[in-house]
């Protein structure tokens, strides 16, 4: 370790740094241990998984749970459904809330103030709060058990409009005005000047929306009855893959649902951290 | 300022009606933005406003899940709700959960952020470790802890050498859900704190160091006051999210209301009434009550913020 | 560097666009990944609640059906058992997106709005595929008929059993000459058995697992022992509660005693009971659906109906039945396929019996193949001593009755309520339920509930 040649001068290992690093390592191990337990469980046989007392490492390493998962379950279906729903929700939310955020921030129309107030009030409504009436609404529209029934109700997030509204307010007006003087229409201004400027904010909203939608359970749980249409979180929780609660398989399925985002996170850490922090901080 | 000068250039030639006069001072490009907000408003009206109105309407009826033959029954649902011990119990469970989770998560998030902020090496690694659980779907995180808490075969009891009936005893069940929630969601608040810590200007600390303040004093007198806003935000977001707890509670309890009903949350109760007992009217009534509670919390926060801003002036 | 980078960016952008576009295309099709792959003429969508050993048996029977009827594509889906299953089935029927064939517990049919959420069977069509009324236990068939129409086609009877490990009981001297557990006829005898079994049990394991914290299982056990006592629920007209709190108290005390005497450890409640059994715990009370699980683990075990400690032998019994969830345009080849599939599975229930269930199709019971099944032959008598919930709209597996009364039983068993108090609370819950209107038709149990 000491042989490595650092490009920039390393900071010294002061005693306080050593203590903090050790502490950080201990806490990290505690945070990661459940992942390890899930992984090791998924590599045991079902009978070994429920042995008393438990042990960390499998005595017989076996991929049976993973194999069974793909052979017997709907897991690949659910994966595709999760991707479809999350991609659709993210693109619709980005488009719709960018337009609306810009509309509220920069344009004038009748009834803007009360409408903005209404959108702010919408921050308090979620499927958790008004799930039953929302379900009956979607039921009336004939969208129970369809992709659209899952997607569209996730596409009106007042919070995202508010975040982009705040951002657009911060863009200097002069840029747009110059373009208007050049005779550009406001749609062109929006798409060629405003949107490229707001890439970081859009990325933040997009990332946050994607995570929320990929992990969403409550609404898909309420609106899908057909296991073919379920998303990962919903399918894993509600449909047993015909063989009961088998912990090894359940852990394998959980890892499959959880790992994509974590792997993406490892590679795009800076953007995701900025995105989540940006979205969260906008509530200030 | 720029706006006025631009207006003189692009001053519209056509005569304006009185209604347009409000926008008179804006350049042409900024008018008639209705089309920008239309798509969002359409979705918003269909999936937020309409369900709210519909919920209020249904709450005055005895509607069932089939959507046929509902009749108006006035305030009966509300009268029943106020006398319904299960509703009060489930409201109490959600409130109890919130009371446990919010302080714990705020303190833990702050401590983790301080830790990650002050360790000079491997910042990305600490961030990854503390934030990774938040990226798991709620149900996966819940299944994982159900397995960790499982009697006999679970790792928690084994590692700590105890025999606590986490998921099967009513005095521990909610605690188990709280622990799971801490692990799963602390990453989000942690990131907010971390971003805020990085936003504190370094020269404040330098100045304090010159004055001879030690690390503890710097934390208490600089860091904590600088984080007051973010703490308010974290607490508010956590309260709103915790009151709406549902996913982890039902999954960890196999979709049952927990030992002796001790983990039945408010959201779970509305769904039970609506989708298991098929009483959509009654479920709507308790949903409306819940909405009023959530709105009250949100409005209280706005009121507090405004007060603080005014007193700061 | 600029140009290749730009090209790569364009490529990525193009791919991304394509990806988004195909996602939308997929969503617009709206059928799910699996439907795209199916190519048979008739597609029968079939929802069931079978997990564990049942799941694999059902799949084997479906595979046999597919082989025999290649023109019918069966798309089977397994849902989480319990309330969510009924919720989803009801919601699908209400939203007119119901599958062609479903499975329900017979006790739930009365409350499931036959006529609105369920369509009646075409008895003629069933006969064409070889299933007739005379092949069933008459009482069972009668439970499935509402308003003169058949709304459910019974597949089996399933019961709560007392599983025991022969290796442990042998050590404790509790096995008879026939290799089965010694007969038990009173509560004292039962606790003596537990006492001796406990001495032969490995350290760290409980003596018996009985789902002490589970509102469904505790309720089923209560129904079984309360019925052994000759207890009743309501009068014939469903206008009065005839629940006997004295008898109920004794049953609750009996259940509670398993914990107070140290035989059941509340820490190993729930599914952990079966895990303990696999690890060497001598007893577990479980549904007969655990037979394939324990057989699969190669245990030396037996199974009897719940011990008749209060007089008459009786054990809780329910029945899985095929139903036709309501479709406004029911008919045509999918409907015919559903009839054919249900009839096939009911008639080929030998495989189903491997899952521990007692087949409802009586010709199966007299076959030599069935008689050779073990431990099924040990508990087949349970069929003649069924303890069932009352036939009212709020009853049935995981129904409102179990939801309201089950937690009270649990509270007593776990000791947070006195048995006498719990019995009184049960009675008042029953009174409340009897006065409650069925939300589907606004009528109480006495007014016929949803049975009309």
Image (cartoon, grey):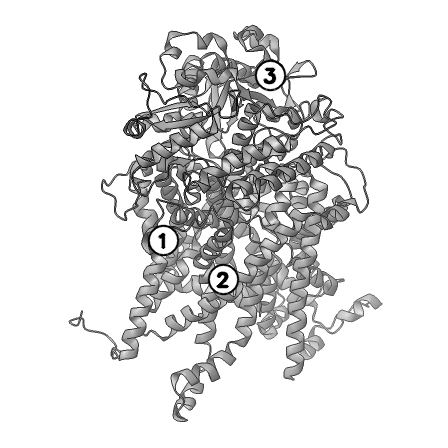
Residue depicted at x 29% and y 76%: A17
SS of the residue under disc 3: helix
Between circles 3 and 1, the one closer to the viewer is 1
Where's residue B62, x and y in %?
75, 39
Residue C108 placement (x, y as % from top left):
60, 27
Residue reaching furthest bottom?
B211
Q: Position of residue A160 (x, y in %)?
A: 58, 60
Q: Secondary structure at mark 2?
A: helix
* Image-based side of A196 in relation to B47, left or right: left
Where, by quadrant of the figure, is residue C8 drawn? Answer: bottom left
Question: Which residue is the site of mark 3?
Answer: C332
Of the numbered discs in the image, which one, if any, rests on residue C311? none
Q: Which mark is residue A204?
A: 2
Give the spatial CA distance, label 3 vs label 2.
51 Å
Residue found at x 56% / y 65%? A194
| Extreme-left residue of the structure | A3
Residue C63, x across and y down, in percent: 41, 19
Q: Is residue A31 above or below residue C168?
A: below
> What residue is disc 1 on?
B162
Q: Residue furthest right?
A: B18
In the rendered structure, the answer to whether residue B228 lies left or right of residue C11 reads: right
Horizontally, is A61 left or right of C21 in the view? left
> What is the C-alpha distance between the residues marked 1 and 2?
44 Å
């Amino acid at each position: 370790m000491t042989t490595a040649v650092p490009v920039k001068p390393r900071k010294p290992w002061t005693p306080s740094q050593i203590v903090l690093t050790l502490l950080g390592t201990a806490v990290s191990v505690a945070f990661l241990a459940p992942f390890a337990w899930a992984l090791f469980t998924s590599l045991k046989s079902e009978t070994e998984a429920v042995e008393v007392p438990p042990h960390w490492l499998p005595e017989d390493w076996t991929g049976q749970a993973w194999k069974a998962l793909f052979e017997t379950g709907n897991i690949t279906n659910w994966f595709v459904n999760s991707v479809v729903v999350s991609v659709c929700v993210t693109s619709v939310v980005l488009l719709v809330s960018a337009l609306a955020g810009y509309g509220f921030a920069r344009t004038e129309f009748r009834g803007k103030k009360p409408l903005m107030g209404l959108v702010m009030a919408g921050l308090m409504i979620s499927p958790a709060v008004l799930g039953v009436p929302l379900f009956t609404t979607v039921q009336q529209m004939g969208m129970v058990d369809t992709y659209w029934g899952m997607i569209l109700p996730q596409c009106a997030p007042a919070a995202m409009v508010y975040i982009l509204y705040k951002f657009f307010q911060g863009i200097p007006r002069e840029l747009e005005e110059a373009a208007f003087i050049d005779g550009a229409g406001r749609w062109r201004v929006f798409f060629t000047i405003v949107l490229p400027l707001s890439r970081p904010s859009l990325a933040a909203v997009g990332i946050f929306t994607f995570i929320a939608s990929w992990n969403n359970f409550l609404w898909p749980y309420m609106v899908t009855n057909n296991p073919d249409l379920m998303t990962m979180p919903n399918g894993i929780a509600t449909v047993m893959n015909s063989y009961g609660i088998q912990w090894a398989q359940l852990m394998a399925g959980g890892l499959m649902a959880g790992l994509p985002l974590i792997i993406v996170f490892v590679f795009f850490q800076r953007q995701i951290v900025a995105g989540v922090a940006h979205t969260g901080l906008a509530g200030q | 300022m720029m706006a006025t000068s631009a207006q003189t250039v692009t001053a519209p030639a056509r005569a304006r009606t009185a209604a347009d006069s409000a926008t008179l001072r804006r350049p042409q490009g900024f008018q008639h933005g209705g089309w920008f907000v239309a798509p969002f408003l359409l979705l918003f009206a269909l999936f937020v406003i309409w369900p709210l109105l519909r919920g209020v309407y249904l709450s005055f009826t005895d509607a069932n899940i089939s959507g046929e033959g509902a009749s108006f029954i006035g305030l009966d649902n509300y009268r029943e709700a106020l006398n319904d011990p299960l509703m009060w119990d489930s409201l109490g469970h959600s409130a109890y959960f919130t009371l446990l989770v919010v302080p714990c998560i705020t303190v833990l998030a702050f401590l983790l952020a301080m830790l990650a902020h002050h360790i000079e090496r491997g910042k990305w690694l600490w961030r990854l470790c503390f934030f990774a659980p938040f990226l798991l779907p709620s149900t996966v995180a819940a299944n994982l802890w159900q397995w960790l808490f499982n009697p006999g075969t679970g790792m928690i009891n084994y590692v700590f050498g105890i025999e606590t009936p986490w998921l099967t005893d009513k005095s521990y069940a909610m605690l188990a859900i709280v622990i799971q929630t801490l692990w799963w969601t602390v990453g989000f608040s942690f990131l907010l704190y971390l971003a805020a810590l990085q936003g504190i200007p370094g020269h404040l600390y330098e100045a304090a160091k010159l004055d001879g303040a030690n690390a503890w004093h710097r934390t208490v007198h600089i860091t904590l006051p600088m984080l007051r806003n973010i703490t308010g935000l974290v607490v508010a977001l956590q309260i709103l999210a915790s009151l709406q707890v549902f996913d982890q509670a039902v999954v960890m309890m196999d979709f049952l209301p927990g030992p002796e009903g001790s983990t039945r949350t408010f959201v779970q109760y509305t769904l039970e009434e609506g989708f298991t007992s098929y009483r959509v009217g009654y479920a709507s009534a308790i949903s409306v009550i819940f909405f009023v509670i959530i709105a009250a919390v949100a409005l209280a926060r706005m009121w507090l913020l405004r007060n603080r801003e005014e007193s700061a002036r | 560097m600029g140009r290749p980078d730009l090209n790569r960016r364009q490529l990525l952008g193009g791919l991304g666009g394509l990806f988004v576009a195909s996602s939308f295309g997929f969503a617009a099709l709206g059928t799910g990944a699996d439907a795209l792959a199916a190519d048979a003429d008739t597609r029968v969508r079939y929802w069931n609640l079978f997990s564990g050993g049942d799941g694999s048996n059902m799949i084997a029977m479906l595979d046999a059906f597919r082989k025999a009827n290649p023109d019918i594509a069966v798309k089977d889906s397994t849902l989480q058992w319990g309330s969510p299953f009924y919720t989803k089935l009801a919601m699908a029927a209400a939203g007119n997106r119901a599958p062609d064939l479903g499975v329900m517990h017979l006790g739930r049919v009365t409350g499931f709005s036959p006529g609105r959420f369920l369509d009646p069977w075409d008895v003629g069509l069933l006969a064409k595929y070889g299933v007739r009324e005379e092949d069933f236990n008459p009482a069972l068939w009668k439970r499935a008929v509402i308003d003169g129409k058949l709304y459910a086609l019974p597949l089996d009877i399933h019961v709560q059993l007392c599983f025991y490990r022969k290796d442990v009981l042998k050590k404790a001297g509790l096995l008879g000459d026939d290799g089965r557990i010694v007969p038990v006829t009173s509560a004292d005898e039962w606790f003596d058995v537990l006492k001796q079994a406990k001495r032969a049990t490995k350290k760290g394991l409980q003596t018996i697992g009985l789902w002490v914290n589970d509102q469904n299982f505790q309720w089923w056990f209560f129904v079984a022992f309360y019925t052994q006592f000759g207890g009743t629920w309501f009068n014939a007209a469903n206008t009065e509660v005839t629940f006997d709190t004295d008898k109920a108290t004794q049953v609750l005390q009996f259940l509670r005693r398993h914990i107070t005497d140290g035989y059941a450890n509340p820490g190993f409640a729930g599914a952990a009971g079966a895990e303990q059994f696999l690890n060497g715990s001598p007893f577990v009370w479980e549904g007969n659906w655990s037979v394939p699980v324990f057989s699969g683990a190669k245990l030396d075990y037996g199974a009897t109906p719940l011990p008749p400690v209060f007089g008459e032998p009786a054990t809780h019994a329910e029945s899985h039945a095929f139903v036709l969830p309501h479709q406004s345009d029911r008919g045509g080849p999918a409907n015919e396929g559903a009839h054919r599939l249900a009839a096939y599975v009911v008639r080929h229930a030998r495989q189903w019996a491997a899952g521990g269930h007692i087949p409802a199709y009586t010709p199966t019971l007299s076959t030599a193949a069935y008689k050779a099944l073990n431990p099924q032959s040990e508990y087949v008598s349970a069929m003649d001593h069924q303890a069932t919930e009352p036939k009212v709209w709020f009853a049935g597996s995981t129904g409102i009755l179990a939801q309201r009364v089950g937690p009270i039983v649990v509270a007593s068993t776990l000791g947070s309520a006195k048995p006498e108090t719990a019995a009184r609370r049960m009675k008042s819950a029953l009174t409340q339920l009897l006065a409650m209107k069925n939300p589907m038709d606004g009528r109480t149990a006495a007014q016929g509930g949803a049975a009309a």
